[in-house]
Amino acid sequence: MTTAVTTLPVLHPARSLARMDMTLALRAGSVAGIVAVYAAAVGILKVFGQREVIVDHLTLGHVFLFSLAGACGAYVWTRSKASIRLRVINVVIAGIASGFFLVALIALMANVNLRWMFTALSSDLLRSLIYDRGAVGGSVLFLGAGALGAICGALLIGLPQTPRRCLVWGLSAVLIAGVFQELIQIALRFGWPITSLRTFLYVWRGLTLQGAMIAFATAFCVCWALDLGRRHLRRRRGPADIDVAIPRLRSQLASAVLLLCILVVFPLVAGSYIGQVMMLVSLFVLMGMGLNIEVGLAGLLDLGFVAFFAVGAYTMALLTADSEFALAHYTSLPSLTFWMALPLAVLAATGIGILFGLPVLGVRGDYLAVATLGLGEIVRVLVISDAAKPVLGGAQGILQVPKPTIGGIELVDPMHLFYLTLVFVLVAALIAWRLEGSRLGRAWTAIRDDEDVAQALGINLVQCKLLAYGLGAAFAGLAGAIFAAMLTSVYPHSFSLLVSINVLALLIVGGLGSLPGVIVGALLLIGLPEVLREFNEYRFLFYGVLLIVVMQWRPEGLWPSPQRKREVRTPRLG
Amino acid sequence: MNVQPILQVTNLHVSYDQIEVLRGVSLSVDHGSIVTLIGANGAGKSTLLRCISGILRPKMGSITFAGAEIGERPAHLIARSGLAHVPEGRRLFAKLTVDENLRMGAFRRNDRRGIDNDREHLLEVFPRLRERFRQVSGTLSGGEQQMVAMARALMSRPRMLLLDEPSMGLSPIMVDFVFETIRKINGEGMTILLVEQNASLALQIATNAYVIENGAISLEGSGVHLMDDPRVREAYLG
Ligand SMILES: Nc1ncnc2c1ncn2[C@@H]1O[C@H](COP(=O)(O)OP(=O)(O)OP(=O)(O)O)[C@@H](O)[C@H]1O
Ligand SMILES: [Mg+2]
């Protein structure tokens, strides 16, 4: 027995652990470094470098690189199992390693011209990042900042929850105040006390150092105060399990109301460009809620969703436009107003939705995705086809769709259109919310989980599935009709597959099956890229990264429904 | 008691794609009885149950339930006419709690009071479920899941229960409990068609039993009678 044991190779445990940690640190540092070099090569770093967070002190490029180092520091700190001293060393090594890649890039760029391949790799790319310090100074800066970033990341992750959350709040406040300075400055433009607040925080180019400190301190203190308050409440109430459900519901309701207030007030103060962006966001929220019925509730994957949006838009255009393609132009039908055409557009979309559902009734899982993808494309191809050109206008689309009117006044201002849409969103949200808790909603849950068992419980599969497609399509048709009136024209190229994918992606990021999740997803995936116009080129890269990050760290989405959370967090039945 | 078959299967043929799995199965289940169907793996037992509850279509033959032909009826209508199927492997809604699963069982019912009463009654039949009431059913033990599956089916107030291998993968104590419960439910008047691997227990509680081999009924008789049959003893009771 004993001889058998001693013949096994014995590793010194501490040493092997240290070696393992070293590998871990180097690996994490390399990943961060490669990401940084990649960002530099494709030009993201350049764009980031032009966006100042704190005037003359900090650009988004710095923040990006520093957070990369911070992330790898935090990763090493949590994964490493060695003693504190070794862990610190490893974190520093990881940080330096992450900086090393950019140093190597500087060296390479000094000797080889890489611009024939990567146009973004110009010599002034990194100059602003290193505050004009030259190659040697810059290299030292990169390595030092990498190490510092990693240490900060590790510190942040190692802190207890309360100070960590407050720090994150503070840093986010600075970031938001800096990155969105134009919008915030516009919002702060009127009135005496507000204007002086603006001059206190900002110069016209952006956030000042003083402003950044104030933003940080304010957010930090607010977070701390909130935390104290929450703790106080919890202590008074005690850890009674049953009572928790009601305050949780209440706090959810409170945050929903808060979100709504922001949606109402924000465009008002932030100007008409934001109004337009929010308009687009709310159209996607409408579509998101529709697709949520199909995918989130009934579990029917649909990649052809844009077809319903198109049907809504074209119906609106055909019924109301002042154009040769309008039905009123060549039939005896009267030309309708927006309000009369709206229910018809929704109805048409619902009908198409049900029609759409019929051929895919028996199709399950992955095949469903492909089948709906095909159906959606059929609609798009049909619209731009020569055959439909005399009716639908072909690639030129239909022009001169009137804007909606209320009491004889035409709503031209994008802000007014936004508020109109917001009303529709609210009504639709109410309907979606009621549906979720209804008998039909429960039938969808059952179908989503197990079609056979659902049938065995007396649930009519055909009816429920067609209702899911029809109701989902109704939301999209509503969005399409508003879209047509908003643009006063419809073109087939607005209805590409990308729209379907966008809607699906925003659902997944926000949290499938969750209504507030739809709003969060739409703000993040539709609103943010519109506001950060200069990053538009990297929009889909941003989508990809966001999707991966969300799937890794919060697979249930950013604002999941309680049930979905349970789904992701509990193991499946064997 | 009314001793007329509630379920009558005559000359049933079923095939998956081209392969014929059931070749002329006939059996009948009397009101208030327990009928057991035993057979080797792959003999076609689950296929028969799936066909009776409408998830599969028969190629030929007839199925009558409570006097009506249901062979061509869609599954949800069969369920609504009072036939509840507890499928092989339980197939709970894994992400829903025990309570939610039970409520799903009562999906077609509107009588809130009746639902609450039935649930209360079932929690007495399965006391373990009361302790696990708010637990997500995917995290239950196999035996507990079987209880939820049976309770869910009973929540629809069926006239007849199809049970597919309720003792599969359970410990001996749990197996005894499950069979005890089956007998108790039957004692309250429920008609049961039971498919089982555990032949000895299944034959003990059976009023009537069938043996299925290669998609056809090879033996039938009363439970006690089949227990003494040398062929059954050799093949299934070992
Ligand atoms: N969906 C299917 N497609 C094709 N063949 C199937 C399908 N389901 C079952 N079969 C085949 O039909 C035959 C009978 O299957 P069935 O599930 O009815 O057997 P069983 O008697 O319930 O067996 P067990 O005791 O193992 O559950 C098997 O040979 C099986 O491979
Ligand atoms: Mg079986």
Image (cartoon, rainbow, N blue to C red):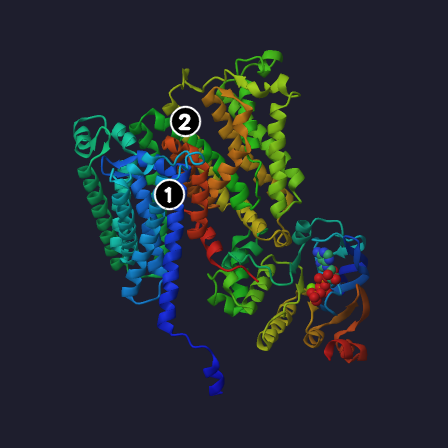
Residue at image location 30% in from the left, 43% down from the top:
A63
Say left or right for A526 vs A201: right
Quarter placement of the C terminus of chain A: bottom right
Q: Chain of mark 1?
A: A
Q: In front of the other: label 2 or label 1?
A: 1
Query: Residues under labels 2 and 1: Cα distance?
Result: 56 Å
| Amino acid at circle 2 | Leu
Disc 1 crowd, CA 10 A, few/some/many (<14, 14-19, 20+): few
Position of residue A272 measured from the top left corner of the image (x, y, whole percent) = 34, 24
Is B27 or A61 nearer to us in this picture? Answer: A61
Residue at image location 49% in from the left, 58% down from the top:
B97
Residue at image location 28% in from the left, 65% down from the top:
A84
Number of callouts in the render? 2
Q: Which residue is mark 2?
A: A420
> Measured along the vertical axis of the image, is residue A412 above or below residue B108?
above
Residue at image location 29% in from the left, 39% down from the top:
A129
| Amino acid at circle 1 | Leu
Disc 2 crowd, CA 10 A, few/some/many (<14, 14-19, 20+): some
Q: Mark 2 and 1 residues: CB-CB less than 8 Å, in contact?
A: no
Say left or right for A517 vs B2: left
Q: Can I make out residue B222 in this image?
A: yes
Position of residue B167 measured from the top left corner of the image (x, y, whole percent) = 63, 70
Q: Which residue is mark 1?
A: A108
Q: Would you identify the image quadrant in which residue A395 lies?
A: top right
> Measured along the vertical axis of the image, is residue A97 above or below residue A345?
below
Q: Chain of mark 2?
A: A
Say left or right for A247 vs A222: right
